[in-house]
């Protein structure tokens, strides 16, 4: 079993402050809180989604004592706390710092790392990504240059199965056969083969090379605007790939340009997967009781919890027999967590909507729950959005259900088409089945 990351020694806790979204890169963090309609919001980066029991309990305490009592999962396997009361920044920082969730105040927003959640648990993949994960996190926190990365910059560590390799990360590393790995940048069709032993160092060099290229691009155009993602650079991703390869060679890392393999972009199905239990969390929203049962389950089976980019959770449970697994899943299901791979919840996502977001035109999560049965019959997954920004939407093909300013919703598919079909109106979520039929007819 993979061990949880150790907690560093306690240090004086930094102070958090609330800011608004219009100050450059205002991506929220643990120390930079966002002022939402339902109170301040903190986004806590959890590299690879990996928590030990002590850390999970600290997050629950922070939600209970400072926020709305719930924990909200993001599409990067991070945790958001909502409804935080005014002036709680220092207390929140102290709670997180005490359990190792703030190893570096200067880097807390750049520790965006997703990793294959079943790595080392189900016999799939070419490598166990945990050494890469701990190595990259430590390298990031030790790099002065990395402090300049945007809170939106993303690393993905894939064990070779291709699951997180399709999540549009800025730096993706995918394990290959024979102890090698393929490093790719943004949407590039090329990848750089590097030794598996040099993955963490290579990923950091790639990110630092991106920062240098972004500064050079801004200087050549006379623009002071920051480039936050690899695909926003003024140079092609293929050109950046070659620049990174040169930087790796200068660092004496063996490397060679290869073709990037296709990815799957699918998370673990609920149930038993090898030496692990897996659940799906409807709309990524966990009550205090759900989180506690999940944490106690992890405590009984090794003490580790892994949050996934698909708003799910994996509990490593080596040696668990069928009877014990069935009992554990039944306890989790009793709280409302999804333990069946046939649940329609696996095909439904939503942004936070009202009342948490001032820009939202509807309580999309409530409406998505009302229309759940109809969603199970859709030909594509559904994503409900409170406005045209469609925050948190998945990158895969889907049906967008977007709230209209005047009431109701509009349905459309996300697939690129030469002549897109017009959206289908939905005046009431209870009529979703009819709207889905109409949308299918228009896009057939």
Image (cartoon, grey):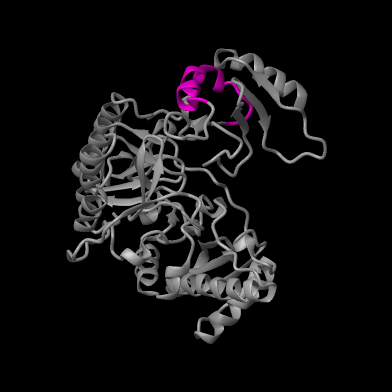
**Can the viewer see residue 61 in this picture?**
yes
Residue under the image location 20 percent in, 39 percent down: 65
424 to the left or right of 130: right
Residue 232 image offset from top left, x and y in percent: 63, 61
> Which quadrant holds residue 234?
bottom right
381 to the left or right of 68: right
Residue under the image location 54 percent in, 80 percent down: 248
Residue 46 image offset from top left, x and y in percent: 35, 53
| Residue 385 vs residue 405, the one in the foreground | 405
Residue furthest out toward the right: 419
**Can the viewer see residue 342 in this picture?**
no
Residue under the image location 68 percent in, 30 percent down: 412
As for residue 64 lying within the magenta part, the answer is no
* Quadrant where the image shows the N terminus: bottom left
Residue 144 in the image: above or below residue 46: below
Residue 206 image offset from top left, x and y in percent: 53, 72
Residue 231 in the image: above or below residue 410: below
* Quadrant where the image shows the C terminus: top right
Residue 434 image offset from top left, x and y in percent: 65, 14
How many numbered marks, from 0 up? 0
As for residue 368 lying within the magenta part, the answer is yes
275 to the left or right of 364: left
Magenta extent: 362-382
């Amino acid at each position: 079993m993979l061990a949880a990351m150790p907690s560093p020694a306690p240090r004086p806790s930094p102070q958090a402050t609330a800011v608004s979204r219009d100050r450059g890169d205002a991506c929220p963090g643990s120390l930079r809180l966002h002022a939402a309609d339902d109170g301040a919001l903190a986004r806590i980066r959890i590299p690879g989604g990996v928590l030990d029991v002590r850390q999970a309990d600290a997050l629950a305490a922070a939600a209970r004592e400072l926020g709305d009592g719930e924990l909200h999962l993001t599409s990067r396997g991070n945790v958001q706390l909502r409804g935080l009361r005014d002036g709680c920044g220092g207390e929140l920082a102290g709670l997180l710092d005490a359990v190792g969730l703030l190893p570096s105040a200067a880097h807390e927003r750049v520790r965006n790392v997703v990793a294959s959640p079943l790595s080392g648990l189900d016999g799939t993949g070419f490598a166990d990504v945990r050494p890469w994960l701990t190595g990259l996190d430590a390298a990031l926190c030790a790099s002065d240059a990395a402090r300049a990365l945007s809170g939106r910059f993303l690393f993905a560590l894939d064990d070779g199965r291709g699951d997180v390799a399709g999540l549009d990360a800025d730096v993706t590393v995918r394990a290959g056969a024979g102890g090698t790995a393929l490093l790719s940048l943004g949407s590039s069709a090329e990848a750089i083969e590097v030794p598996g032993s040099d993955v963490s160092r290579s990923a950091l060099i790639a990110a630092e090379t991106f920062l240098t290229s972004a500064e050079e691009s801004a200087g050549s155009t006379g623009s002071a605007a920051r480039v936050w993602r690899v695909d926003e650079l003024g140079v092609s991703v293929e050109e950046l790939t070659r620049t990174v390869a040169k930087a790796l060679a200068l660092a004496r890392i063996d490397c060679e340009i290869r073709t990037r393999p296709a990815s799957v972009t699918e998370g673990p199905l609920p149930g038993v997967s090898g030496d692990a239990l897996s659940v799906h969390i409807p709309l990524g929203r966990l009550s205090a009781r759900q989180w506690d049962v999940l944490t106690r389950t992890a405590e009984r089976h090794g003490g580790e919890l892994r949050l996934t980019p698909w708003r799910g959770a994996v509990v490593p449970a080596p040696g668990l027999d069928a009877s014990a697994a069935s009992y554990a899943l039944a306890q989790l299901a009793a709280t409302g967590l999804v333990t069946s791979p046939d649940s329609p919840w696996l095909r439904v996502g939503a942004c936070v909507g009202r009342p948490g977001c001032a820009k939202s035109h509807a309580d999309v999560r409530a409406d998505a729950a009302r229309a759940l049965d109809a969603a199970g019959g859709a030909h594509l997954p559904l994503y409900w959005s409170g406005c045209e920004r469609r925050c948190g939407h998945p990158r895969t093909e889907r049906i967008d259900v977007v709230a209209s300013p005047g009431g109701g919703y509009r349905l459309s598919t996300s697939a690129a088409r030469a002549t897109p079909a017009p959206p289908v109106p939905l005046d009431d979520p209870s009529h979703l089945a009819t709207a889905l039929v109409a949308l299918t007819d228009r896009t057939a």
